[in-house]
Amino acid sequence: MKNYLLIFVCLYISACGIGKYTWKDTENKRAANNPCYEASIEPTHLDNTPRYGFSSFKLRLRNKTDKDIVINWDKTFYVDAGGTKGLFVDQAMNDNRQVKSPDAVFPKGSYTHEIYPAACLLYSEGRYSSGYEHDYMPEGEKGVILSVTCDGNEVKEKMTVKLINKY
């Protein structure tokens, strides 16, 4: 009887296990390359907890020109299921939900920053403090439409990945 109970408990635990979130880059959609810059996105886990999902993107950008380029955060959008769903904030700005100020990238320079979809901020009221917290992005196609001013012109590129929960 004890053996059956042990087998039942093991099967129950394995069946109720939490999935592991992962992502796919099909057809190299997570990268952009044009005469002004090369860019890529990579989903990142909140507090390095992969079993709960992704909460942000690590944006990497390299200026290919001999002039400054500017990232226009007020025109850079979060992509959710093929459409846009708001702007981005960074970790320090989640309490007041303000859009990031434009960032300049120097000639031949690089830029790396973690960005959070404003659409995934949740207001949390706790016993000792209240404020916005980063929630996880749901499964499916997610990404960034990046807006950069290069030599006086706006250059937009769309980069996407597919988020998957593997049980």
Image (cartoon, grey):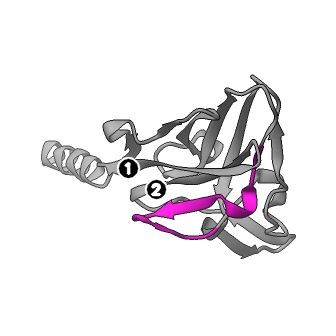
Does residue 104 appear to the left or right of 89 in the view shown? right
Query: Which disc number belongs to residue 101?
Result: none
Mark 1–mark 2 Cα distance, whole angstroms, equals 6 Å
Counting other residues with Cα less than 10 Å from the Cα at mark 2, is it few (<14), some (14-19), or many (20 or more)? many
Q: Which residues are magenta?
A: 70-86
The tag on residue 162 is 1
Which residue is pictured at 79% across the width and 63% down the height? 99
- Residue 89 highlighted magenta (yes or no): no
Numbered circles on residues, count: 2
Whole-percent x, y for residue 156 in the image = 58, 52
Earlier in the chain: of badge 1 and badge 2, it is 2
Q: Foreground residue, 23 or 75?
A: 75
Name above or below for residue 110 compared with residue 119.
Answer: above
Tell me if I can see residue 18 in this picture. Answer: no
In the displayed structure image, the side of residue 5 where residue 125 appears, left or right: right
Residue 142 is labelled as: 2
User: Residue 159, how many percent across, how many down?
Assistant: 49, 47
**In the displayed structure, would residue 81 be above or below residue 32?**
below
Q: Is residue 132 left or right of residue 82?
A: right
Residue nearest the observer in this picture, 32 or 166: 32
